Amino acid sequence: MPRGLAHPVRQSIPLAAIAAAFIAMLAWSWKTWPDVMIDFGRELYVPWQLTEGRVFSRDLVCIYGPLSVHFNALCFALFGASLRTLVLVNALIAAFLLYLIYQVLLFLGGKVSAIVGCLVFILMFAFGQLCFVGNYNFMCPYAHEATHGVTLAMAALFLFLRWLQHGRAARAFASGFCAGLVFLTKLEPFVAVAAALSAGWIAVAACELAVKRSRRSAFALFTIGGLLPIVSAFGLLWTAMPAAQALRATLGSWLYLNNTDVLTMPFFQLGMGTANPVGTARNFVVPLIWYAVVLGFAAVVALRLPGEVARRAAAILIPLLILELYRRTSSAEGWYDAAKPLPLFMALGAVGSAALCLGRGRRAADPRVLGTFVACLFALVLLGKMIFNARFRDYGFVLAMPATLLMVSGLVDWMPREIRRSGGSGMIFRCAALTCIGGVVLTNLRLNHQYFAAKTHWIGKGPDAFRADVRASCMQQVLDWLEQRSPQRDATLAVLPEGVMINYLARLPNPTPFTSFLPPDLLMFGEHRMLAALRSSPPTYVVIAQRYTAEFGAPWFGIDYAHETMRWVRANYAKAHHVGDPPLRDESFFGMEILRYVGSPPAP
């Protein structure tokens, strides 16, 4: 190879590895990403209905902000309403987020942590499935507001770091603009990015910076940029509805913060880790011991072992010991629960970097240290919804992702750098850390394999087809029956308590504004309001679907909750068909019942 080409080729190898991992995971997980019944049907149905002329918040009740559904509706309008359209757009968004991750980790740590962090994102968060329910990936998320929100938040963080480096006011404005867009998505990413950037600006005001710039004008531009998308969204919604309703539509999930009945449901308590404090403490201590034993041993050896030959030998032997430990304990909790101590690590990172930044007196603060403080605080606040039960699975694909990547940066760049400064061998610790990271990634890939292998049934047609578990077989039979019996275009359908995926795949709208009748929906909107919508616009068909909802404290629709709604359905609908087992009886079986409206026409 000519000598002049060696450096560019060497530089391109890591980027080629990242691209290869992205393509490999995309191919391996192809069309397995959505859950066939839970949540994701809404992500297809609502944008499709917006393209059909219905209006957000007025005709379709949504609990999140207006940005994501209108963006997806625009994609449907431009490229056709299909699952394939969303997947291709989401793949581009994931690639853009990958670029942001690389740049942020490159600035905060170095090239090694940037490359490893990108690979961890691809292998663990972008495409996988780590629990029975799908939707917890960037291809088909349970709520696009989550993935759009965290991507825009990372963009705001990246632009703020760029401003710290170079001091261009346009980047401060762009950072605020991205943060304002996050407000229009979901509560969690906005609170995290707002807290982190607010603390960052306070730190900027409290210390000197190496690059001279006008901090007041930059902050003013940041504030203007943040308000611009929020005010614009309100104005656009105001053109379609009264001002009060437009304000509610702009605020999204902020309206439901005072609904304590929803927040105290078992589902949310288990997710946060407050339902069982003793079990939570045990689950936190076990992986912490793993960290202390494995990485603590590597750190001691790296600091104490003299001699270059001995250090190189240790850099080989310690990873081999870790691999043997993994072979013997790969099913132990320490590998599955490696995310549990993340809040503690992020808190230590935020406090430590803040102390370094603000403890320099009149000397200029290091932008990298200040950026580390902002990034760790962002990751810590984003973990708030699972603060005592941090995890990679379910919501962790978004909420724990930034903290995981910062942890990777700390293990493969920050810690080895500090060990070298103390006269030790950073190579020993880095090799041990990379082996541990590989063990955690491999553990999660094994889970992916289990859930991918169970998805042997196809549902949908053409660009809407995807693979799912055995539930898809029953749902496809429902779709086939509806296609044969209901060719008329004016037919409507409601699936109770959940299953709007059938509405989308059958292209049958729900005449009410509500996409599900789950316990949280009834608490937020009121059963009387939801039942009134059914009475005023009774669907042509109602499908009673098997959906066990014990995680919300009420297992069965019509038995443990929604009694009035079920009584009205039974009084006005007759059984037309059923598939599978009788629904709403046993959680171990699955089935659906199709009912046809036989009641009196509603009064005008």
Image (cartoon, helix red, strand yellow):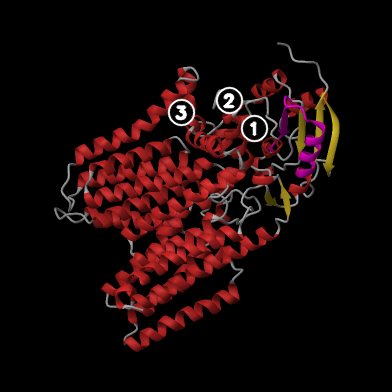
Region in magenta: 476-499
Name the residue rendered at 37%, 87% in the picture: 310
Q: For residue 584, which quarter of the picture?
A: top right
Magenta includes 495?
yes
Name the residue rendered at 74%, 25% in the picture: 564
Q: Is residue 63 left or right of residue 368?
A: right
- The amino acid pointed to by label 1 is Thr
Residue under circle 1?
515
Q: For residue 228, which quarter of the picture?
A: top left
Quadrant of the snapshot with the C terminus: top right
Residue under circle 2?
53
Where 321 sits versus 477, above or below? below
Q: How far apart are marks 2 and 1 (CA)?
A: 17 Å
Q: Is residue 414 left or right of residue 40?
A: left
Which residue is more in the foreground, 394 or 238? 238
First of labels 3, 1 by sequence position: 3
Residue under circle 3?
250
Classify mark 2: helix, strand or loop: loop
Q: In this view, does 295 lie to the left or right of 226?
A: right
Which residue is more in the foreground, 121 or 408? 121
First of labels 3, 2 by sequence position: 2
Residue that sits furthest to the top in the current view: 604
Q: Where is residue 110 in the image (x, y as percent from the top left)?
A: 33, 64
Which residue is more in the foreground, 5 or 57? 5
Are there few (<14), some (14-19), or many (20+) residues within 10 Å of tag 2? few
Residue that sits furthest to the front in the current view: 2
Q: Where is residue 160 in the image (x, y as percent from the top left)?
A: 30, 47
